[in-house]
Amino acid sequence: MAKLIGCVGTSHIPAIGGAIHKGLQQEPYWKPFFDGFPPVHAWLAQKRPDVAVIFYNDHGLNFFLDKMPTFAIGAAAQYNNADEGWGIPTLPPFQGEVDLSWHIVNALIDKDFDVVTCQEMLVDHSCTLPLKLLWPQGPCPVTVVPICINTVQFPLPKASRVYALGKAVGEAIASWDSSKTVAVIGSGGLSHQLDGERAGHINKEFDLQFLESLNSNPEWATQFSIHELVEKAGTQGIELLMWLAMRAALTSGPQPGVRKVHSNYHIPISNTATGLLALEKTGT
Ligand SMILES: [Fe+2]
């Protein structure tokens, strides 16, 4: 069976793409953010996952407000990057892991998650930037399974439902008949709000509590309603749901322990609190 090695959560602010393109990683503004990644690079180089399952949110590229699935899973052989116009250079297409996509789809439907399946799927910066941050050199070495969770248009899925989804995805990965190794990525957040009276809202205390909960008490955030989470993290900070799904995926199996590899937190980039967290799955 396939082996799930662990997870990495990271922010995906569009400007990161521009900073990578212009080589600004060591500029004072960007250095505290990019300096978080080398320990995670070293861990990934040691573990060498074959596949990345990515929980992310589309920002109006593949799904717009007229058609907004709550959960959508890519089942394509290739994913083209076509961002929505922030001047970020697009990246070469990413190769899909079709067999795992359909295995996850079948497993989720069997567990009463009525997901949308996408055999064509454009992916935006939310899906592509984590891959470039985690494997900055050369072509992307992993195949991908993108899983899109709606955090753009209400009604949003409850945190508890997202957690259940992530757990089911983790169980599907663990039951995939393959010798490949899999990493799970959560893309989004942390606290930020781009519009309205609270534009610029950042909640460091909540972010740090959330990061700690992912390490030690992964169901912690499921106690809150979506509106409570938006109040704490901001209207775009609700992207933290991706991190929750990612962490839930690691709870599969009889010994669902984790070891923290590395974490980083820095405010602000743009007007967003940026986070990074890598956890290794233990006991398998
Ligand atoms: Fe976003």
Image (cartoon, rainbow, N blue to C red):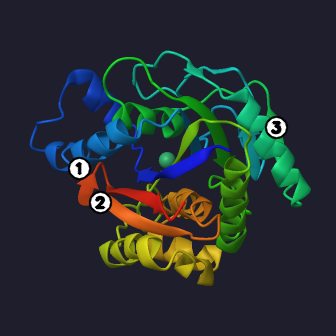
Ligand 1 neighbours mark 3 (CB distance < 8 Å):
no
Kindly report the distance in space between the C-alpha atoms of the residues bearing marks 1 and 2: 7 Å
SS for callout 2: strand
The mark nearer the N terminus, 1 or 3, is: 1
Q: Which mark is residue 36?
A: 1
Which quadrant is home to the C terminus?
Answer: bottom right
To which residue does mark 2 refer?
Answer: 263
Q: Is residue 256 above or below residue 173?
A: below
- Residue 229, how many percent across, how many down? 54, 74
- Disc 1 to disc 2: CB gap under 8 Å: yes
Answer left or right for 169 relative to 12.
Answer: right
At 55% from the left edge and 77% from the top edge, which residue is drawn?
Answer: 221
Could you say where residue 44 lies in the image, as x and y percent from the top left?
A: 36, 41
Position of 166 with respect to 90 (left or right) is: right
Residue 272: give x, y in percent of width and height.
34, 56
Query: Which residue is painted at 51% across and 59% down in the image?
Result: 243
| Amino acid carrying mark 3 in the image | Thr
